[in-house]
Structure formats: C-alpha cells, structure tokens
Amino acid sequence: MEIDYISGQKNDKIFGMSKYQMEIHKRLDIKLNVIEYDSMMTNLEKRYNSSQSTGYNELHLEKAANIKTREDSKIKKFFVNSGKNIFQNIDRYRYKLIVEKNIKKDNIKHLTSQELAYLLNSIKMDRSIVTCYDLIPWAYENNHSKIWKNNMSGLKKANIIMTISDFSRDEIIKYLNYPEDRIHIVSAAVDHDLYQKRRDKSILNKLNLPLDYKYILYVGSETPRQNLKFLLKAFNKLKKKLPNVKLLKIGEPQSYGARKKLLNSISEMDLQNDVIFMGYVMEEELPKWYNASDLLVYPCLYAGFGLPPLEAMACGTPVITSNTSSLPEVVDDAGIMVDPYNVNSMSLNMYEILTNQGLQTDLMRKGIKRAKSFNWDKSARETQEVYDSL
C-alpha cells in the first residue's frame, strides 16, 4: 500500500499537527509519497517576527520614545494582513500545481490538515482522507473568508474525515452536515517512553532560575483563544499570596501582534521578572520542563484536543485547564477544570494545588493513570484500519 501523503508546507519544528502525524506514521509500515512545499508565507512571517521586539527593554524603549501611535498600528496591521492574504493565496495555488503533478492515480490520498481541503475542489482525488483536527477559524473565530469557504466545501468532498476527539467530530457534523459514519476518531496521544514521571528541577539551572521557587508552566501559542491575558491576571492575584512563584511560557506567538500585546500586559501588571519566555523547545527536552514544573495551566477557550495537559499528566505534573470544548474529555477527573473567564477561581485553584501536598499527590496519581489511556500505538492501528477500509 502506498499513500499520497499531502502534508502541506515543510516544517522543521515538531508540535501540534506535525507531532500527531509524525508519531502515527513512524509506527506504520506504509510507503508514503510525501508531497510538500516551501511556504512563501512562512518565510515572510519568519522575517517579520525576527524584526519584532521580544524583550522588555525594547518594549520600554518603544513606549518611552512613542514610536508608534494607535493609528500607525492600525495601518501597519492592514498592510500586514493584506500582504499575508496575497502570499497565502499564492502558496495555495503553487501547492495545487505541485499536488497535481505528484499524486499517483492508484494511491490513497491523505490530506493531513483541514487547511488543505481546498485542494479537493479542483483536483479529482479518488479514495481521499482529510485529517480535520478542528474548525477553529470557522466555528470559533467566525472566519468565513473565501479561503475558509473553500476549505469547508473541500471537506465535504472527502471520502473519509479523520479527527481527534468527540468534540471535533460533533463540530464537523454541526457545521458541515457531514455523515457521522464517515468520520473516524483517531485520538492524539502521548509517547510514554519520552513523557514519564521523572521529577527533577535541574533543568531550571539552564536559565539560572532559583530551585526553591514554585513554577507554573504554559505550553502553546499566544493566539487570543489561548486566553493568556486571563492566565496573567490569575497569576498576578496568586503572587500576592505566594510571592515565590514564576510562570514559564513555552511556544512561539503564532499570531500577528500577540507577543507585543502579551508583553504590554506583563508590563502593566509589573510581572517582568516573573514570566520567562523560552520560545520553541525541542521535543526531547520538553518532558524535562514538564517534570521541573509544579503545575501546568492551560486556559484555552477552544481546542480540538489539547496535547499539553495530556503530556503534563504523563509526567506527573498536576493540571488546571478549561471546562470547555474537548478539554474535559482529555483530562476527565485527573485534573482541575475551571471556567476560563473566572479569574478568582483560577487563582484559588492554582494556590490550592501549589500549597496542598495531598492534592498534588492525588492529581499526580490520577494524571499518570489517565494519560496511559492515550497511546500512539493504538492511534496508529486505527489509522491503518482507515487506510485498509479504502
């Protein structure tokens, strides 16, 4: 069996969707005809992000000099968004030509993201599968642009849709009216050889951080749905009762202007010395940060799954997450779920976990047990079954 593996843009970093596909396909004995491309849009974003302020000193200087007015920012955002749309459309057209040239008639066609579904509108693909992780732009962000209308209509043309949670399946049925019997749930999971309980704070020495502090960890992007300003407010309240605590933030912004807004909020709350940005962390090192942290907080408003809470639980790190979207089906009773708009509740639960050894132990035990029910070998077998069905 050979699969036309239509995987979109090349990426040398492992997180989210790329982690999901990598973990499953390294466990399958299947030949992949990988069809990918170099993204002009991503290269443009890298250049732009590298020129942006990522530290507090630059932010303060910019404020003091009053370099940018609100009107300037609006104009800049307009041109950035316009340029982004142009390059995104060019990328999509370029990739369409690449896919047309490289697919093979008799192969199963696996499009590895809902953002590639537009290809099904213009390329005839027999035996097609689309992995749809979520419908965030359409269902949550209300993005009904031409690009997303094309993605939604393309999804309807897939022979099979694979998704990662009951929540995402229900959203697909709701917004696409897609037949439930053609939706297959292949859950995200965790590599238990890598993510396991090895409680050790020594990696904190890498950043010269004090070992006697409590550490709250957040792993993910800075897009608005991740609700980080809410986390900062809860963290700020917590510090008034528990001064020796810091917030570790792993992950890139992945959203225009998000880092600057976050830095502004940190500055307004006078938390400059208490929030540590680490950017992208290699997969092999990530479990060490989970194990060094006393608590993971994931206040996301809408998620197709939520890998960070699962990975944290596998490492024995207590978890607080939102009681919304797919997150309850990931965490179940092994973590604390809160209203992602209730700052007081979040702060109180953070304090309780960090100061109650009995609660920490209970959550650690439950979390490890819960994480074991998510296994990449099982996900790989289920993916193989979908391929076999075609």
Image (tube, helix red, strand yellow):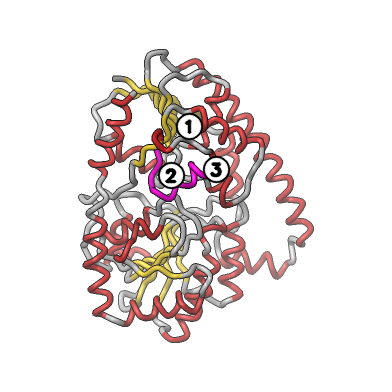
Q: Which residue carries the number 3 mark?
A: 175
Q: At which x and y percent is residue 154?
A: 54, 30
The Cα atoms of the two marked residues, 3 and 2, are separated by 10 Å
Outermost bottom residue? 241
Determine crowd level at label 3: few under 14, some 14-19, many 20+ residues with C-alpha closer than 10 A: few
Q: Which residue carries the number 2 mark?
A: 169
- The reply to whether callout 1 and callout 2 are in contact (CB within 8 Å) is no
- The reply to whether callout 1 and callout 3 are in contact (CB within 8 Å) is no
Up/down of 160 relative to 316, above or below: above
Choose the circle earlier in sequence order: 1 or 2. Answer: 1
The Cα atoms of the two marked residues, 1 and 3, are separated by 24 Å
Camera-nearest label, 1 or 3? 3
Amino acid on which disc 1 is placed: Gly
Magenta span of residues? 162-175
Determine crowd level at label 2: few under 14, some 14-19, many 20+ residues with C-alpha closer than 10 A: many
Principal secondary structure, stretch drawn in magenta: helix
Rendered image: mark on residue 8? 1
Q: Is residue 165 magenta?
A: yes
Q: Secondary structure at mark 3?
A: helix
Q: At which x and y percent is residue 278?
A: 43, 59
Q: At which x and y percent is residue 72?
A: 77, 56
